[in-house]
Image (cartoon, helix red, strand yellow):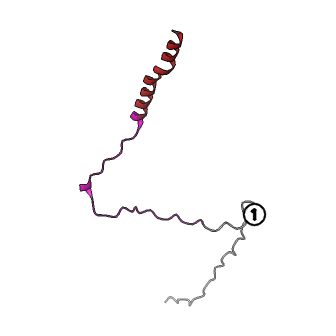
């Protein structure tokens, strides 16, 4: 009698547990979209993905390098013009 009870508890009662796990798995699955053949737009199946840009060249000097040299300041030149005489 104890062997039959052991088999009943550990084998037969696992079937409802497995069914419940399968039901939960089936419920969380995303439904597959239905495709109608009449909705063909005649366009291409390709998407418009662009290739990613290549990275630029590395910066010169690194993060601890000395700062870049300051360009020479511009000097303004004055242009001498004719004086206008007033009457």
Extent of the magenta region: 26-55
Residue labelled with disc 1: 65
Q: Is residue 58 left or right of residue 46?
A: right
Q: Is residue 17 above or below residue 58?
A: above
Q: Point out residue 8 in the picture as x, y percentages from the top left corner.
A: 48, 16
Q: Looking at the picture, tell me which residue is in the foreground, 52 or 2.
A: 2
Q: Is residue 85 above or below residue 19?
A: below
Q: Secondary structure at mark 1?
A: loop
Q: Residue 66: which quarter of the image?
A: bottom right
Q: Would you say the magenta stretch is mainly helix, strand or loop?
A: loop
Q: Residue 29: which quarter of the image?
A: top left
Identify which residue is drawn at 52% across, 89% down: 84
Q: How many marks?
A: 1
Q: Residue furthest top?
A: 1
Q: Looking at the picture, tell me which residue is in the foreground, 78 or 30.
A: 30
Identify which residue is drawn at 50% across, 88% down: 86
Identify which residue is drawn at 26% across, 55% down: 37
Q: Neighbour class for label 1 at 10 Å: few (<14), some, many (≥20)?
A: few
Q: Point out residue 44 in the picture as x, y percentages from the top left corner.
A: 34, 64
Q: Does the magenta segment cover residue 59?
A: no
Q: Does the magenta segment cover residue 48?
A: yes
Q: Looking at the picture, tell me which residue is in the foreground, 69 or 65.
A: 65
Identify which residue is drawn at 60% across, 87% down: 80
Q: Is residue 83 above or below residue 41?
A: below
Q: Looking at the picture, tell me which residue is in the foreground, 87 or 46.
A: 46
């Amino acid at each position: 009698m104890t062997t039959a009870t052991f088999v009943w508890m550990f084998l037969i009662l696992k079937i409802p547990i497995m069914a419940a796990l399968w039901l939960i798995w089936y419920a969380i699955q995303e439904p597959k979209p239905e495709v109608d053949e009449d909705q063909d737009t005649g366009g291409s199946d390709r998407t418009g993905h662009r290739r990613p840009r290549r990275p630029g060249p590395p910066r010169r000097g690194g993060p601890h390098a000395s700062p870049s040299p300051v360009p020479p300041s511009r000097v303004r030149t004055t242009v001498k013009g004719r004086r206008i005489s007033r009457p």
